[in-house]
Amino acid sequence: MIVTLATNTYDLDGFIQIKALASSSFGDITRRVNVVKTLDGGVAVNDGGSSQGDRSVLIMWKSKDKAYEANVARVVENYSRLTMTFHEGAFETVPTGYNQRGAESVLNLQILSKLA
């Protein structure tokens, strides 16, 4: 699957295309539900709905050349917001971590909102 990342301000090298491995995770869609047992033997349910902000993304790919990996690290270090696109749409994200482990690279992102 192809994932793209882009800085929200102009940066000549701020567009990154990643061929994500199947082991990548794009965050489960969950609901903010709280179930409480009541004294009469029933339950009270509080359903706070669903939010894109509850999704954490883990993108994994086969490491590329040093210049590519250095650019990914630079973008994560210098930009607090990135636009990410993949088959579900476009999202505003916050990069929370990047790690290159030998032949594999890992990028963690927290989704803030769905843009399109």
Image: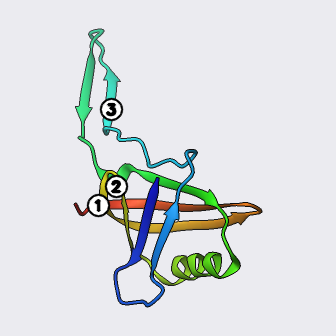
Name above or below for residue 68 compared with residue 93.
Answer: below
The Cα atoms of the two marked residues, 3 and 1, are separated by 23 Å
Which one is earlier in the sequence, the residue at label 2 or at label 3?
3
- Considering every residue shown, the one lying at the far right of the view is 102
Along the line of sight, the residue nearer the viewer: 30 or 20: 20
What residue do we see at 44% from left, 61% from top? 3
Neighbor class of circle 1 (other Cα within 10 Å; few <14, some 14-19, many 20+) is: some
Q: Amino acid at mark 1?
A: Ser
Residue matched to label 2 = 53
Mark 3, residue position: 34
| First of labels 2, 1 by sequence position | 2
**Quadrant assignment, res 101:** bottom right
Q: Are marks 2 and 3 in contact (CB under 8 Å)?
A: no
Which one is in front, 14 or 37?
14
Residue 52 position, x and y percent, is 31, 52
Circles 2, 1 touching at the beta carbon (< 8 Å) = yes
Residue labelled with disc 1:
113
